[in-house]
Amino acid sequence: MKYFIRHSGKILAVLLLSAAGSVPYCFATVETFTDESSGLISWKAQHPGFSLQFIQLLPDYVRAVYGARGLPQEVVDLMAGYCVFGTIIKNESGDVLGYRVADWRYFTADGQSHPVKTKTQWLKEWQDMGVAFRWSLLPDEQQFAPGDWSQGFTTLPLAPGTTFKLGYQWTQQGKIYNGTFEQLQCAADKSPDE
Amino acid sequence: MELSNNCNAQRTNHLMNKPLIATMLILVLCAPLATLQAELPSPELSHELTRLEPPVTAPGFSLTDMDGEQHTLDDYRGKVIMLNLWATWCPPCRREIPSMESIFQDLGDKGFVVLAVNQFETPDHVFAYMGQLSVYPTFPILFDQDSKVSELYGVKGLPTTLLINRQGQVAYRAIGGRDFDHPRVRAIVNQLLTENDKPLTAVSNVK
């Protein structure tokens, strides 16, 4: 995949990072990336020692992933009906870092806060549908040692193209931190070139 | 859960206490920065392994390989084992395979083995996938189709890799993709290879 590069933005980020020595620990950058060929967008929040990335996924892609695992069509359609993001969490610090998806919230246009559906909740539903598959979704909670990272799908019951705010939380050195993506957007039902 | 470190809250505190210029700088730095467009790199594979203190006994298992041959953990007792849990749809799993093959090629004759335990996929599917790789693995690919082994080892996400010492204990762990060909990883494996043998721990097999 190829991505647009805007060098001025990167220089600005470096300058701001350099000046951040005495800044409170809450400092974060949020970058967006647009895939040149598909038009799909991803967002990356970079905190000191911690990064979180959300990558738009098309419903057809989600359908293909679960279809290829041989899951029942009912499950494939159910998953593709959600707004799904590839999610990457990295511990870039020298300490133990943890997260719990149950602590995350998304905010819809009406200002309402909603919990993010967890892997445990999905596995229960899949189990009830006779499915033993337990991979692909972002683990509910993890404790990362230095260098550890994880990825998986995050699902939200939102229509294609919906924009929303997401509040996330993590722990580092025994402290709880939180951050916000002010505007994430579910992928449209089709990529722009279709 | 109480939130003790809220970016917006800290920003407000600084607005009350700092001179104008410092306040403006902090306002810029603390707030989520204006969105920047940049190149999206694949996440870099790190090389850090977490030492388990104390090491824990590696649960036994019995799995079949691509040819239907049975492999048990006991078959490899006395060796240093890199137990890698993976799947074809997992991008970092794919990226770390060449580094596993490289270290296996170099240290395989010194008592080191890689066991790549695939999750929930069939040998036919994995065989087709292997044909697309630039480096074809020569270490055993085993099939944990009901994910019992991953559950036994408490694995939550893929890839996860465990280093089992000659005494049959999980000594190191890595969650997420790694560059196993890194000198640091090689040093750890070499250290485990040179450790004195101790009595083996009894284990039970899981089928």
Image (cartoon, rainbow, N blue to C red):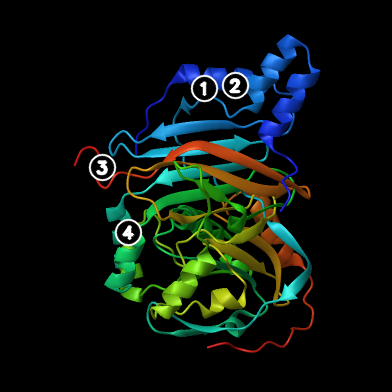
Counting from the top left corner in percent of width and height, residue B48 is at: 66, 51
Residues under labels 4 and 2: Cα distance?
38 Å
| Residue receiving disc 1 | A10
| Residue receiving disc 3 | A191
Q: Give the number of the disc on residue A14.
A: 2
Q: Pick whichever, B114 or A151, lies toward us.
A: A151
Residue closest to the far left:
A194
- Marks 2/1 in contact by CB < 8 Å: the verdict is yes
Q: Residue at x 35, y 75 (%)?
A: B123
Q: Pick whichever, A11 or A128, lies toward us.
A: A128
Q: Pick whichever, A162 or A140, lies toward us.
A: A162
Q: Residue at x 71, y 49 (%)?
A: A171
Counting from the top left corner in percent of width and height, residue A43 is at: 47, 38
Chain under numbered label 1: A
| Total numbered badges shown on the rendered structure | 4
- Marks 3/1 in contact by CB < 8 Å: the verdict is no
Tell me: B193 left or right of A112: right
Q: Can you tell which of label 3 and label 4 is closer to the viewer?
A: 4
Q: Give the number of the disc on residue A156.
A: none
Residues under labels 4 and 1: Cα distance?
35 Å
The mark that comes first in sequence, 4 or 1, is 1
Q: Can you tell which of label 3 and label 1 is closer to the viewer?
A: 3
- Report if residue B141 is visible in the image: no
Chain under numbered label 4: A
The mark that comes first in sequence, 3 or 4, is 4
